[in-house]
Image (spheres, rainbow, N blue to C red):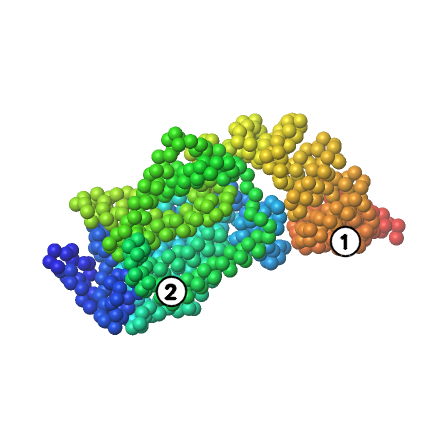
């Protein structure tokens, strides 16, 4: 005992203890008030015997990295919250960027006129799940938080959306202190049910690594990343809830609370309704239960199987009814959630294109496998060196590996060399603490990543920084444990401490600079040009920004670069720019090329219809818009353009039929109500027209044209007082409303004439 390292003094705080347990000279003082539910001590110790409070070895190894004085838990959490806030606070006043436009600004599910029930029938982007064009991403609880944001802020003001994301990341980082304390120190409770943190230093360091990791910028600074943040929050709450199930013990063994297990399963369902990845917490809970609670030793079992040891039949966990019962609950909960998810999804999986995920379309199994593994190595590299970050990694950014002579094979070899080494250590080490930490670290690294791995189904991306938000927890476990091992086996303690501090500071600076790039689309898209110069989507988005600013010539150059990998959206936007430059023949060709590469492309059919309308080809325009509404029945713009075109060409009966058809499919769309009301007014169906105008105004009371056209209806109908009232409202909302002032002056002259005649 004399040669052992003295253990640092540790304080138990709380009303149930208040006693200090010190370890002078390596001795441990017994504590009768502690209950053990982890592998901190040898299996077989009776709970009636005195147990010993012992700091986790990984914490002892970090003595020279983190000061000896251990921060109380609440101070540690405050420090983590402050650091995470400093890293990402710079994003609070950013714009809506990239996917935010479709998921938030253009998503009708956020508006008050959309019934709340529709959120449970639509995907993340506001499309019906049954639609052929649906992305099938089902995250109704995340969309609900966007809707609450929109309601509380009174509109689409990005500041409130960004603040919620920042606070969510800070909250998750704080929770990580508790999660890491369990992963490093095991699960131990006092006799009154208070969980002990036996690894305060390592849990604090790992939480700091997590809080400042730059790869999290996309989730925090990009508002649509809230899905990953909410999914992670409820993932962690589910895990901590599962740990709460084991607060009590008796002489026969570990008791557990069925209530907490069921609550943990419920929280996993909530996590899945925020982001599909959330369901994987059930798998992690099962691994944790088997290894930490059930004390499963895989190495021992494998050895007994290889040696045909008859004692295999007597392995305790096989006869552990409570463990098998918990596993049954976890499996049943997961199966039920997957079945419900499948039923809600309606049709089959989403239809992705080859440019979204080229490896998944490769004919050769070898090419698919080798590229999938290369993608895994890129994800690992982003965790190790998060310097080259990009908002999108598809569309030609990462060329396919097609032969073993490609030098990038080295990355695969390095990845599997490290993984196999870690797995062997996790399974074969004689040190029970080492086995637990490495296994749980690998579990967090791998299990939440499985839905993005292409192993079970095709995903719509190559690499996505947002999907490694949860797996980064496993990376932080392994990194912290690695520094602990280094500190134990080297004399250069100050160098290790400086390295740790350097990593934290560099990552903080990188987070701040990356947040600045996410503040607006111009900075975001241009930052990607140096990281992914082959990415068609990057060139497309830079070109789109230039087109929006009116620089059509420069936009065409970037669009030309974007169409190299047969990128349908780039072809469509190239057509839009060509159309604006009155290069109609080239625009038509670009639109049809886009449709060639994406057959189900309603927006392209809509733009093609606009081109034909400009060329005075009404039948072609109607056919194009009809195709758009067939592919996307809720395509409001296409429906409205059909009604307006038929109205303008004098086909009032057909325009009325199309309007009624549209209103059946989209009954709450005020713009369609308005268009149909105009047609009915011209057909002298005044009463029905009036009802639709009033309904449209109720849904959108600030639209000057709605009030102005209702005034025209009353003017034609001979209801001059109401006509005067609505003309005045329209002019108040928009004094420059075209035609309204002239119509109002005509009405005033008519009223003056009537007054003169009456006199």
Q: Is residue 751 visible?
A: no
State the count of labels. Answer: 2
Query: Relative to residue 690, is residue 734 drawn left or right?
Result: left
Query: Relative to residue 267, is residue 30 drawn left or right?
Result: left
Q: CA–CA distance between discs 2 and 1?
A: 68 Å
| Residue at image coords 70%, 41% | 626
Query: Relative to residue 343, is residue 366 drawn left or right?
Result: left
Looking at the rendering, which quadrant does residue 578 occupy?
top right
**Camera-side residue of 40 and 502:** 40
Residue 231 spot, x, y in % from top left = 46, 54
| Residue at image coords 68%, 44% | 630
Q: Disc 1 on helix, strand or loop?
A: helix
Query: Can you identify the residue that label 2 sits on?
Result: 323
Looking at the rendered image, the disc whose residue lies closer to the viewer, 2 or 1, is 2
Q: Disc 2 on helix, strand or loop?
A: helix
| Residue at image coords 74%, 53% | 692
Looking at the rendering, which quadrant does residue 308 occupy?
bottom left
Residue 216 spot, x, y in % from top left = 41, 46
**Camera-side residue of 578 and 59:** 59
**Camera-side residue of 225 and 442:** 442
Query: Can you identify the residue that label 1 sits on?
Result: 690
- Pick the quarter of the image with the N terminus: bottom left
Query: Relative to residue 333, is residue 613 drawn left or right?
Result: right
> Looking at this rendering, what residue extends furthest in the left direction?
2
């Amino acid at each position: 005992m004399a040669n052992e390292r003295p253990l640092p003094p540790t304080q138990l705080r709380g009303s149930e203890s208040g006693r200090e347990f010190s370890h002078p000279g390596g001795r441990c003082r017994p504590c009768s008030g502690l209950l053990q539910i982890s592998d901190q001590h040898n299996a077989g110790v009776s709970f009636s015997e005195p147990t010993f409070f012992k700091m986790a070895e990984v914490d002892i190894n970090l003595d020279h990295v983190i000061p000896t004085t251990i921060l109380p838990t609440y101070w540690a959490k405050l420090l983590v919250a402050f650091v995470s806030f400093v890293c990402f606070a710079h994003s609070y006043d950013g714009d809506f960027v990239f996917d935010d436009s479709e998921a938030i600004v253009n998503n009708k599910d956020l508006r008050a006129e959309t019934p709340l029930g529709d959120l449970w029938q639509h995907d993340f982007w506001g499309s019906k799940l049954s639609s052929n064009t649906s992305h099938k991403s089902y995250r109704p609880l995340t969309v609900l938080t966007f809707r609450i944001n929109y309601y509380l802020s009174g509109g689409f003001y990005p500041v409130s959306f960004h603040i919620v994301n920042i606070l969510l990341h800070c909250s998750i980082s704080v929770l990580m202190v508790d999660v890491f304390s369990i992963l490093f120190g095991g699960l131990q409770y006092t006799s009154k049910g208070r969980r002990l943190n036996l690894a305060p230093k390592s849990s604090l360091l790992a939480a700091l690594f997590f809080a400042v990791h730059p790869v999290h910028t996309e989730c925090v600074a990009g508002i649509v990343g809230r899905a990953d943040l909410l999914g992670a929050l409820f993932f962690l709450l589910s895990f901590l809830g599962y740990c709460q199930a084991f607060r009590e013990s008796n002489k026969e063994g570990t008791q557990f609370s069925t209530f907490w297990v069921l609550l943990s399963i419920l929280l996993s369902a909530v996590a899945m309704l925020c982001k599909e990845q959330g369901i994987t917490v059930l798998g992690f809970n099962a691994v944790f239960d088997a290894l930490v609670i059930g004390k499963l030793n895989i190495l021992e079992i494998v050895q007994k199987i290889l040696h045909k040891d008859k004692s295999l039949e007597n392995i305790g966990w096989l006869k552990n009814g409570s463990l098998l019962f918990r596993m049954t609950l976890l499996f049943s909960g997961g199966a039920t959630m997957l079945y419900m998810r499948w039923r809600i999804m309606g049709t089959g999986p989403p239809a992705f294109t080859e440019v979204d995920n080229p490896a998944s379309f490769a004919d050769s199994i070898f090419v698919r496998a080798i590229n999938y593994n290369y993608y895994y190595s890129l994800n690992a590299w982003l965790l190790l060196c998060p310097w080259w970050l990009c908002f999108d990694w598809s569309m030609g950014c990462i060329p396919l590996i097609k032969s073993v002579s490609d030098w990038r094979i080295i990355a695969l070899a390095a990845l599997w060399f490290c993984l196999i080494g870690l797995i062997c250590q996790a399974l074969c080490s004689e040190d029970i603490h080492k086995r637990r930490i490495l296994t749980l670290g690998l579990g967090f690294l791998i299990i939440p990543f499985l839905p993005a791995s292409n192993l079970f189904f095709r995903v719509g991306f190559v690499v996505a920084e947002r999907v490694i938000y949860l797996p980064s927890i496993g990376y932080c476990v392994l990194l912290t444990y690695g520094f602990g091992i280094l500190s134990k086996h080297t004399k250069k303690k100050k160098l290790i401490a400086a390295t740790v501090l350097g990593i934290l500071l560099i990552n903080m600076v990188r987070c701040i600079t990356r947040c600045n790039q996410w503040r607006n689309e111009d900075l975001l898209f241009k930052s990607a040009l140096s990281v992914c110069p082959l990415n068609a989507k990057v060139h497309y988005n830079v070109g789109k920004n230039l087109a929006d600013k009116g620089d059509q010539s420069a936009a065409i150059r970037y669009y030309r670069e974007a169409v190299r990998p047969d990128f349908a959206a780039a072809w469509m936007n190239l057509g839009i720019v060509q159309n604006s430059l009155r290069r109609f023949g080239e625009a038509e060709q670009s639109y049809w090329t886009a449709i060639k590469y994406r057959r189900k492309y309603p927006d392209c059919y809509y733009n093609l219809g606009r081109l034909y309308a400009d060329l005075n080809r009404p039948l072609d325009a109607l056919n194009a818009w009809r195709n758009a509404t067939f592919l996307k029945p809720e395509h409001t713009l296409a429906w409205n353009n059909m009604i307006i075109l038929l109205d303008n060409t004098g086909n009032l009966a057909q325009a009325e039929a199309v309007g009624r058809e549209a209103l059946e499919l989209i009954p709450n769309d005020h713009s369609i109500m308005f268009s149909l009301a105009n047609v009915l007014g011209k057909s002298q169906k005044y009463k029905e027209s009036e009802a639709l105008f009033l309904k449209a105004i109720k849904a959108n009371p600030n639209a000057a044209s709605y009030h102005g056209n209702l005034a025209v209806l009353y003017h034609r109908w001979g209801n001059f007082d109401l006509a005067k009232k609505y003309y005045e409202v329209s002019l108040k909302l928009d004094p420059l409303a075209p035609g309204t002032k002239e119509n109002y002056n005509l009405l005033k002259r008519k009223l003056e004439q009537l007054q003169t005649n009456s006199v």
